[in-house]
Image: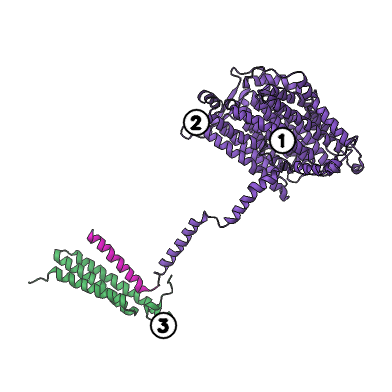
């Protein structure tokens, strides 16, 4: 059985993370920002899995479970906020909500 | 018995604290009780201690009591310590004795004043500060008392503060004496720097061991101390504050601005006389200042129309005599004149206070006249005080003033000059004193028919006691010489005799004769004299005290005001304004980064994380 080298896995995680980050920074629609955040979560999770399998330890998978739970909770709260935002401001544009600028 | 010394300043301090903390809520009899009682106790204690000190003097002729250590900075450890010797005992007696009498008088004089509790609180504080001043063992504690009496003087001159002029006079007194105080403080620092102590006795001992006579340091130190003395004792060139200080209530003029506080300068010079002996130039300067002051101010007094200002100028002139005495080395005579002056000058002020009291606060002597029959007690006490002030034979003033003048005559080549100045001063003294008495108490009483002697028993009793002291205070001469002998260690000196003594004794009668011819027999007319051109000019010039106030106004006050007007936007503020501008700029710069946009913040966080990682990786 051939194993995929760790560098590839980490590289993939880094690429995924960057895609997610760029998505957070460039997207104005709050839904897409949330989706990009999910991508970033999963990139971090992938990095844990790859590292865990490289050293043959279960800690990586435990961390991934933790991240999964965290992501689920985050989506729950985040979607609730998005709902409220849409009800109050009738928009999903994150930049429109800049009432706290100095 | 002597270990009760610390109680003497403590009683008045306790009185002050009680009166201040109750803040005028005490009923008037209680206020009088506390104020007069505390000073009365101090006076009683002084009498007992003095008796003890005289009958069984300590081996070393002084008694020192250390109450506690004030502070300890390096090798500078001044104590709150009291030092009793002949000199401080004399002053203590005058302060508590005359102070007690004046407290008693004030009970009658201030009875109707709504804020008499405040008045007595200040008065007690003054007695505390003044006793601290004379009992102080080191110059720092002396300076504490010195500033304390200055503060009380300021508070009491401006006692009737609703009148803006009174506040102005109070500020003037405070600022002018501050000039002298600054010189004195520099003097203290100089002494400490070079002799490493402020303990007076140690200081005198070290000064005479380490400094040669006539040396620069001794001269400078004596000059700076003299600066303080000149300010406090209202001598040339800082005498302008004292006449204006008459804005205060009359008992204050008697106590602070005649009997006690203004002689603090004389005390300082007498206390540090070793230093002045080491600096003969400055001691000569003391005599010159005294002689010049007594002459100049004598002329000023002759022109005044305000009853209190006449006596105020005469106070300056009498302190001039004391300074002259100290300057020619007649230490004991100078101190003796302080004592007799305290008696007759407070008597004169209190009698003038009686006139003012019965006249509903009228000060102009030309609105009075013929009061001899209307105010008999006041008249006779005025006569007693006036006779002593003019140094008529057998009154107290005669003994002290003659001693000063006759000693001055024998000292050095300039002695006769000093003597002549003093004799002309004595002539002027008799003239202005009896001019005042003749105008106020003699002549027609048309305008004063309604005036009655309306003061109570306490004021009358004080006047009588002080009259007796003013007339017979000369009897204190011998005991005083005994007491002061151990302080000054003066050798017996030849005093001038013959015609010099005769002139000195008779000159006051000439003065009385001159004013008699002007104001009683009307052989000459003072008005006609003033009508001539030169007469009018001299009258105006001397009335304004040789234009000193005008000079200071032009030379110091106006330039200062102009400078203040130019520098209205204070140059010192510029750096501080710079700080304000800079921080406001920073605030605007930073606040621009707060866009309120979520993505901007996220980018900021990312940037920060990248920087941290980069730092972590690269380092």
According to the rendering, which colour does chain B have?
purple
Q: Percent x, y for residue B286?
A: 64, 30
Q: CA distance from mark 1 to mark 3?
A: 92 Å
Say the numbered circle drawn on residue B316.
1
Give the farthest residue toward the bottom.
Answer: A90
CA separation in Å, label 2 and label 3:
86 Å
| Residue A47 lies within the magenta run | no
Nearest the eye: A57 or B83: B83
- Look at mark 2 in the image and give the residue it sits on: B194
Q: Is residue B500 visible?
A: yes
Question: Where does the image place residue B562, in percent across and percent down from the top left?
Answer: 62, 53
At which x and y percent is residue B133?
Answer: 62, 32
Give the residue number, with chain letter if any, for mark 3.
A90
- State the SS at label 1: helix
Out of B367 and B548, give the one closest to the viewer. B548
Q: Is residue B604 magenta?
A: yes
Q: Colour of chain A?
A: green
Q: Nearer the viewer, mark 2 or mark 3?
A: 2
Magenta stretch: give its range.
B595-618
Residue visible at 73% across and 22% down in the picture: B476
B618 on left or right of B56: left
Of helix, strand and loop, which mostly describes the magenta segment?
helix
């Amino acid at each position: 059985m051939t194993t995929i080298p760790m560098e590839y896995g980490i590289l993939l995680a880094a690429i995924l993370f960057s895609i997610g980050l760029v998505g957070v920074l460039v997207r104005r629609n709050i839904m897409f920002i949330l989706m990009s955040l999910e991508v970033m979560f999963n990139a971090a999770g992938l990095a844990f899995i790859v590292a865990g399998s490289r050293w043959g330890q279960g800690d990586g998978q435990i961390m991934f479970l933790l991240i999964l739970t965290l992501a689920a909770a985050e989506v729950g709260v985040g979607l609730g906020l998005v709902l409220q935002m849409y009800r109050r401001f009738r928009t999903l544009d994150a930049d429109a909500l800049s009432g706290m600028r100095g | 018995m002597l270990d009760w010394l610390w109680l003497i300043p403590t009683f008045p301090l306790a009185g002050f604290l009680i009166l201040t903390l109750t803040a005028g809520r005490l009923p008037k009899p209680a206020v009088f009780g506390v104020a007069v009682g505390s000073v009365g106790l101090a006076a009683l204690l002084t009498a007992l201690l003095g008796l003890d000190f005289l009958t069984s003097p300590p081996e070393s002729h002084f008694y020192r009591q250390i109450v506690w250590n004030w502070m300890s900075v390096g090798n500078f450890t001044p104590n709150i310590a009291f030092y009793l010797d002949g000199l401080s005992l004399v002053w203590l007696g005058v302060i508590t004795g005359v102070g007690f009498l004046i407290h008693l008088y004030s009970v009658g004089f201030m009875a109707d004043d709504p804020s008499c509790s405040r008045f007595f609180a200040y008065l007690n504080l003054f007695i505390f500060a003044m006793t601290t001043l004379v009992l102080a063992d080191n110059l720092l504690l002396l300076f504490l008392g010195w500033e304390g009496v200055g503060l009380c003087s300021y508070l009491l001159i401006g006692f009737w503060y609703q009148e803006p002029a009174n506040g102005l006079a109070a500020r003037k007194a405070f600022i002018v004496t501050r000039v002298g105080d600054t010189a004195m403080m520099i003097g203290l620092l100089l002494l400490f720097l070079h002799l490493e102590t402020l303990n007076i006795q140690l200081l005198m001992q070290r000064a005479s061991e380490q400094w040669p006579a006539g040396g620069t340091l001794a001269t400078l130190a004596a000059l700076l101390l003299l600066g303080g003395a000149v300010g406090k004792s209202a001598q040339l060139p800082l005498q302008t504050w004292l006449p204006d200080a008459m804005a205060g209530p009359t008992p204050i003029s008697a106590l602070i601005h005649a009997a006690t506080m203004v002689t603090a300068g004389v005390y300082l010079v007498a206390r540090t006389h070793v230093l002045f002996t080491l600096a003969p130039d400055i001691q000569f300067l003391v005599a010159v200042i005294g002689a010049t002051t007594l002459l100049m101010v004598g002329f000023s007094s002759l022109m005044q129309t305000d009853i209190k200002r006449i006596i105020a100028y005469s106070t300056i002139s009498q302190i001039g005599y004391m300074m002259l005495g100290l300057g020619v080395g007649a230490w004991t005579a100078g101190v003796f004149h302080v004592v007799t002056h305290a008696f007759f000058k407070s008597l004169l002020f209190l009698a003038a206070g009686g006139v003012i009291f019965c006249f509903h606060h009228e000060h102009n002597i030309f609105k009075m006249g013929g009061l001899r029959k209307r105010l008999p007690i006041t008249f006779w006490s005025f006569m007693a005080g006036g006779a002593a002030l003019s140094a008529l034979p057998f009154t107290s003033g005669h003994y002290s003033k003659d001693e000063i003048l006759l000693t001055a005559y024998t000292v050095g080549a300039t002695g006769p000059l000093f003597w002549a100045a003093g004799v002309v001063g004595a002539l002027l003294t008799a003239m202005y004193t009896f001019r005042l008495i003749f105008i106020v108490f003699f002549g027609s009483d048309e305008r004063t028919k309604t005036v009655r002697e309306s003061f109570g028993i306490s004021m009358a009793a004080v006047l009588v006691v002080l009259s007796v002291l003013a007339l017979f205070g000369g009897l204190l001469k011998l005991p005083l010489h005994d007491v002061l002998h151990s302080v000054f260690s003066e050798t017996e000196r030849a005093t001038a005799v013959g015609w010099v003594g005769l002139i000195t004794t008779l000159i006051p009668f000439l003065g009385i004769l001159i004013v008699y011819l002007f104001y009683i027999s009307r052989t000459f007319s003072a008005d006609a004299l003033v009508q001539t051109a030169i007469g009018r000019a001299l009258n105006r010039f001397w009335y304004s005290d040789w234009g000193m106030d005008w000079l200071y106004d032009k030379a110091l006050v106006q330039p200062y005001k102009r400078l203040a007007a130019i520098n209205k936007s204070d140059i010192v503020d510029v750096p501080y304004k710079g700080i304000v501008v800079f921080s406001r700029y920073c605030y605007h710069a930073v606040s621009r980064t707060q866009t309120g946009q979520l993505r901007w913040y996220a980018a900021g966080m990312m940037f920060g994380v990248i920087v941290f990682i980069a730092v972590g990786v690269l380092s």
